[in-house]
Image (tube, grey):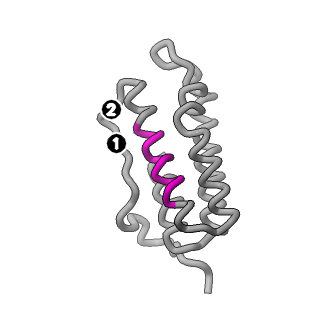
């Protein structure tokens, strides 16, 4: 999940909206897969928990990508990051803290728009 979250933030930072759209889709798919693979964790519905904490922020991220609005994206991405951390805390994994990437950890990928 962390690489998908990072790639989403990095691509939007460089205003590569096509890559950001793809990264958002991959992030959503990964969340859905986790809910399918592990439907319950400590007597809690994983799908319900993820929807409650990340559902609205992901929709806001997608809207910001569609309108190519960096300020709107940044606000939505911050809510998404907060939602991820809220979900971790609710599942007693508060030691997993996600943050917005401050640099790329992917030396083999260009995040800016294709030239």
Q: Is residue 75 magenta?
A: yes
Q: Position of residue 64 (x, y in %)?
A: 63, 60
Q: Is residue 35 above or below residue 30?
A: above
User: Which residue corresponds to the image point at 62% horizontal and 81% vertical from the top-left?
Assistant: 114
Q: Nearer the viewer, residue 66 or 96?
A: 66
**Mark 1 = which residue?**
97
Q: Position of residue 94 (x, y in %)?
A: 33, 32
Magenta stretch in the rendered image = 74-85
> Quick check: 98 left or right of 114?
left
**Mark 2 = which residue?**
94
Which quadrant would residue 16 be assigned to in this image?
Answer: bottom right
Q: CA distance from mark 1 to mark 2?
A: 7 Å
Q: Is residue 30 above or below residue 43?
A: below
> Quick check: 65 left or right of 102?
right
Which quadrant would residue 105 be assigned to in this image?
Answer: bottom left
Q: Position of residue 49 (x, y in %)?
A: 54, 27
Q: Quadrant of the C terminus?
A: bottom right
Q: Is residue 46 above or below residue 57?
A: above
Q: Are marks 1 and 2 in contact (CB under 8 Å)?
A: yes
Q: Residues within 10 Å of mark 1 (few under 14, many from 20)?
A: few
Q: Is residue 10 above or below residue 87?
A: below
Quick one: SS at disc 2? Answer: loop
User: Which residue corresponds to the image point at 56% horizontal and 73% vertical from the top-left?
Assistant: 15
């Amino acid at each position: 999940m962390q690489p998908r979250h990072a790639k989403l933030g990095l691509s939007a930072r460089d205003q590569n909206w096509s890559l950001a759209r793809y990264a958002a889709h991959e992030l959503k798919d990964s969340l859905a897969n986790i809910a399918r693979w592990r439907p319950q964790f400590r007597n809690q519905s994983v799908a319900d928990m993820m929807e409650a904490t990340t559902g609205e922020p992901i929709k806001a991220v997608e809207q910001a990508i569609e309108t190519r609005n960096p300020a709107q994206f940044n606000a939505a991405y911050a809510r998404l990051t907060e939602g991820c951390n809220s979900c971790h805390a609710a599942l007693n994994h508060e030691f997993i803290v996600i943050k917005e990437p401050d640099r790329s950890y992917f030396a083999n990928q260009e995040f800016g728009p294709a030239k």
